[in-house]
Amino acid sequence: MLVVVNLLRTALAATLGLAAIGHGQGLPDRVLVGYWHNWTSTSTKQPLRWVPPAYDVVNVSFAIPATRLGADMRFTPSPSMYTSVQAFVNDVRALQAKGKKVLISIGGGADPVHLDRAADVQTFVTSMLSIIRTYGFDGMDIDLEGSSLTLSNGDRDFRKPTSPRIVNVIAGVRALLKQLPASFLLTAAPETAFVQGGYGTYAGIWGAYLPVLHALRDRLTFVHVQHYNSGSMYGRDGNTYRPATADFHVAMADSLLAGFPVDRWGLNLWFPPLDADQVAIGLPASTRAAGNGYTAPNVVHGALDYVILGKPTAGTYRLSGPGFPRFRGLMTWSINWDVEAKQAFSTPHRRYFDSLFLRASSETVRETGGSIDFTLRAGCANAHRSYLLLAGVTGTQPGTPLPGGRTLLPLNLDPFTLLVLDPRLGTVFRGFTGWLDAQGSATARLSLPPVPGLRGLRMDYAFTLPQSWGLASNPRRVTIVP
């Protein structure tokens, strides 16, 4: 049987033009990221193993300098939750076994990191390498705040930084990455002043993260700017937007997705856009988690519908393009606050991402026969492109990487997949291939005949766009019931 399945996989790969089938990708195309406190900050202790399953990436907070404003980094699991290093390592491994990525975040708001001299670079690299290897972290998150990154007088071009702390941070991160596997993740969580704040002023903290993001863009997995504890900020259109509004979230994201002028009324240098899958939004998990910025889920989803699908909100900001379907997701400060709020953050946002591109009218179909309608939404940026809705019965993990290696179809190819492509079964799988409309949408229908004896069978569905292979939908599961 295994030989037959492998032959069918090969045939399907040739049909679809896929490559490297069976080679999984480290992260889903859309992620929910959360910070985990290495201290007791809420009403209950929350060991790492208690992280809700909704999260894809967990940022352990924080590795901090052994001496204030130093470069010698240290991390010790909180003794209030862990009696030994091994106990913490066991929790890291337990999350990884569930497919989660566990990163170590450096700095934080209370502990600036200063790399003032060339010698500090080696100290930073040596200490961080020890932390990463000791605990088995999958990546590093840069959460340098306060005085960690500041622009010195005369440092005017983010492309050629001269400020020692900025130059040394870039050098330190690059030197560290050289000693780690290519799969090691690198993320960042700057405050708005340090990024979009560079639009109006490039000095001091204003725009101070831009040289770091620019220099590391080739290795940056994604950046989630903190859309909280912020004042009103300029959008790339020159207007200002208030935090905790859909306009603010769209405008701040658009600056990184489309690029923006730095020191707009001075040198007016262009900061090139990041790739859409390198950009996410950072939000507080509750009103208690930050001084400002908390945004109700329905408002967030309206902003995401605009950013991802090109569906305008009722606000005034106008997105630079028809949408960015590869936009990466959401980050929150923090998992601990989310748990205290009974997962009022992660539950609705996980549900949103799990039905963003593909929805089904039902999760079950009877073995006596029945139909299910699928709604496909690829966004305005994919209007009039061809689509391919596929199915499988062997699950969604590890999935199938699409050509180009950057998009993972959350579906394992198997013999059932070939049935969807068989033109003789067009009355069963109606509209499973076709063309998206002007909004990048389409519908399909599963019309299942009586299938006695198959109760309990689980079928997973997901679609992709074979013209570009640049998008893979979320999966939807359908189960045959009595």
Image (tube, helix red, strand yellow):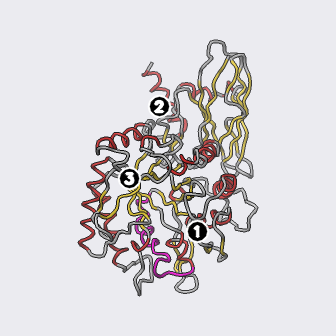
Residue at the spot 47% in from the left edge and 72% down from the top edge: 210
Tell me whether the residue at label 3 lies in contact with that at label 1, contact meaning CB atoms closer than 8 angstroms: no
Q: Is residue 208 magenta?
A: yes
Q: Quadrant of residue 146?
A: bottom left
Amino acid on which the number 2 mark rests in the picture: Thr
For the point 29% across and 54% down, the residue is 131
Front-most of residues 432 and 164: 164
How many numbered callouts? 3
Q: Nearer the viewer, residue 355 or 15?
A: 355
- In this figure, which residue is indicated by the disc labeled 3? 139
Query: Mark 1 — residue?
Result: 255
Residue 296, given in percent of the width and then of the height, sits at: 67, 55
Disc 1: CA contacts within 10 A as few (<14), some (14-19) or many (>=20): many
- Residue 46 place in picture, x, y as percent: 45, 45
Secondary structure character of the magenta stretch overall = loop
Callout 1, which amino acid?
Ser
Q: CA distance from mark 3 to mark 1?
A: 25 Å
x 53%, y 76%: residue: 198
- Disc 1/disc 2 C-alpha distance (Å): 42 Å
Part of the protein shown in magenta: 200-220
Viewed as shown, does residue 306 lie left or right of 404?
A: right
Residue 33 can be seen, yes or no: no
Disc 3 element: strand
N-terminal-most mark, 2 or 3: 2
Circles 1 and 2: CB atoms closer than 8 Å: no
Does label 3 or label 1 sit earlier along the sequence?
Answer: 3
Q: Are marks 2 and 3 in contact (CB under 8 Å)?
A: no
Which label was assigned to residue 10? Answer: 2
- Mark 2 lies on a secondary structure that is helix
Give the residue furthest to the top: 453
